[in-house]
Amino acid sequence: MENNIIDLSLLPPRERHATFFSHFARLTPGNSLVLRNDHDPKPLFYELQAEHGAGFSWEYLEKGPEIWAVRIGLQSDSPADESLGQIVARDMRSISVFKRYDLDYCCGGKKSLRQACAEKNIDPEEVLTALERSVDQPHPSRALPYEEWSLSFLADFIENTHHQYVLKALPDLVTYAQRVAMAHGEHHPELDQVKALVMASEAELRSHMAKEEQILFPYIRNMERLVKEGNGAPAGGNAWVAQPIRMMEMEHETVGSNFAQIRQLTGDLALPEDACTTYRLFFELIDTFEDDLHVHIHLENNLLFPKAISMEKALVP
Ligand SMILES: [Fe+2]
Ligand SMILES: [Fe+2]
């Protein structure tokens, strides 16, 4: 929920410019405000650019025809103001630190470290120190140079590793969920809810990955090919990609929150004393599956999708 909103459309035109700049002057580094107006406030972008160079961000939230809304942020040099997704994109070793502090770097990857810590009542300096220490750890084998890859290669990689893993693991996950709920549901009634969340995630993931593989990823590969060949814009020259990406991000949030609920229901996958081997294997699989899901969603939300949106913007201004 945005709380720093300035609605210039409610003010007489002569007061708008000064009102905006007095609010912007009070903005502290790493924070943002949302500007609403009844026409495109692009001239302000050029004024800010002249004054701040590249030290601010400008993101359209609505583009007319009646209302324009732009999120304008003042950038900061502090690492605490970097987003969780950017930190992970730069160094995958940060994943273990974020997991330890229960900070969501995939669906919540757009939040700054400072903001995510504030929501969990954690001192961001403590996390920054842990991140610095993690740099001394050896790189895990999965720390691949994702950032350097072409979008087509990244999409192929996601399909061939993460989608394949999900398809392979889902039947086991569902079977375990059903068996464990059947055998232990009487003494652990939360297992029925866990089973329902697993089944809902299975259905969601199957249709979600099919949409990515059949529609979104082919569009991205084709767009990149057109850019390489200097062959014009895709989709008849219309911007298309942001909307399906928004839909994919919402579906990521749904599945991510299903697994977060499973953790909540089970006391962070704590095994009860009467847990049998299947119960233990089930919880181990949930843990591994969720880890993979987080990296998978991170690669899409924080790398593939923003790069595809930028590429399309350059083709279809
Ligand atoms: Fe995916
Ligand atoms: Fe996805």
Image (tube, grey):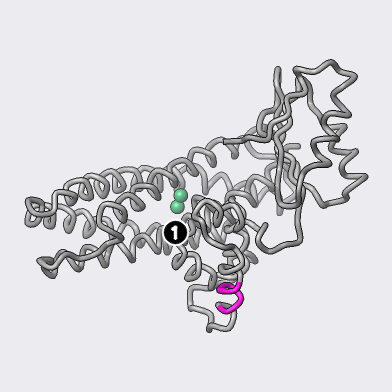
Whether residue 219 sits left or right of residue 175 in the image: it is right
Number of numbered discs overlaid on the protein picture: 1
53 above or below 135? above
Quarter-wise, where is residue 6 in the image? top right
Q: Main secondary structure of the magenta part?
A: helix
Q: Amino acid at mark 1?
A: His
Residue situated in front as seen by the camera: 62 or 108: 108
Location of residue 64 in the rendering, given as x and y in whole percent from the top left corner = 70, 22
**Quadrant, the C terminus:** top right
Whether residue 25 sits left or right of residue 189 in the image: it is right
Q: Residue at x 57, y 79 (%)?
A: 133
**Quadrant, the N terminus:** top right
Q: Residue at x 57, y 57 (%)?
A: 152
Quarter-wise, where is residue 71 in the image? top right
Q: Secondary structure at mark 1?
A: helix
The span shown in magenta is 129-133
Residue situated in front as seen by the camera: 186 or 42: 186
For disc 1, the marked residue is: 294
Location of residue 18 in the rendering, given as x and y in whole percent from the top left corner = 88, 29
Q: Residue at x 53, y 39 (%)?
A: 246
Whether residue 48 sits left or right of residue 289 in the image: it is right
314 above or below 18? below
